[in-house]
Image (spheres, rainbow, N blue to C red):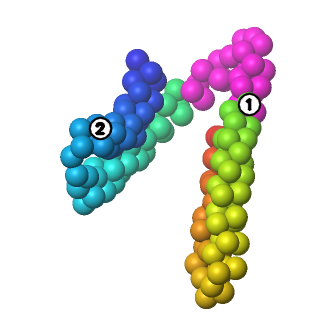
Amino acid sequence: MILYLLPLAALAMIIIPLVVAIRRVHSGKAVNRKRTVLLNGGLFLGTMILMMIFMPILASAEGASEAAAAAAGSGDAAIGMGLKYIAAALPTCFATIGTGIAVANAASAAIGAVSEDEKVFSKALIFVALGEGVAIYGILVSILILNG
């Protein structure tokens, strides 16, 4: 039961700030940035604490079920390994697509800004590098999936 509720709770904690922000924008109210940052940070911290508490429990239960499947000689272990590789490929795929879009937009804007004023080169370079960070996060998530 907890195996199904934990991801739903984590997803809800991540989506709540987005829903609050969209609701405020559509209602025309001014966005209180301090409250938004506190809400986002608190829910992120709550998600991390939730994962730190329950992931070892889930990992031990999953390890026991994998050992039982391997002992039974069923094909479920092979399917699980295939799904593991697909799950590792997806974060890298989407992160690199997002990086391409971000770098394309940021680099063209940076080139335009540098052509007008050469003093903004370092600031423009930082924005291009921030887009590259998304790809690194995608690769890190893939590595964690493969090692898990």
Tell me residue 45's x, y (percent): 35, 51
SS class, disc 1: helix
Q: Residue 47 placed where, x, y %?
A: 38, 43
Magenta highlight range: 62-85
Quadrant in which residue 87 is drawn? top right
Give the crowd class for mark 2: few <14, some 14-19, many >=20 residues within 10 Å. Answer: few
Decide which of 113, 141 is in the foreground and name it.
113
Report the quarter where the C terminus lies: top right
Q: Which residue is drawn at 34% across and 39% down?
A: 22
On the image, numbered disc 2 is attached to which residue?
A: 26
How far apart are labels 1 and 2 at the CA level? 38 Å
34 inside magenta stretch: no
- Give the label, 1 or 2, closer to the camera: 2
Q: Is residue 28 visible?
A: yes
Residue 13 appears left or right of 127: left
Which label's residue is closer to the chain start, 1 or 2?
A: 2
**Residue visible at 60% across and 21% down in the picture:** 65
Circle 1 residues within 10 Å: few <14, some 14–19, many ≥20: few
Residue depicted at 72% across the width and 15% down the height: 76
Q: In this view, does 12 lie to the left or right of 71?
A: left
Tell me the quarter of the image containing the N terminus: top left
What residue does disc 1 label?
Answer: 86
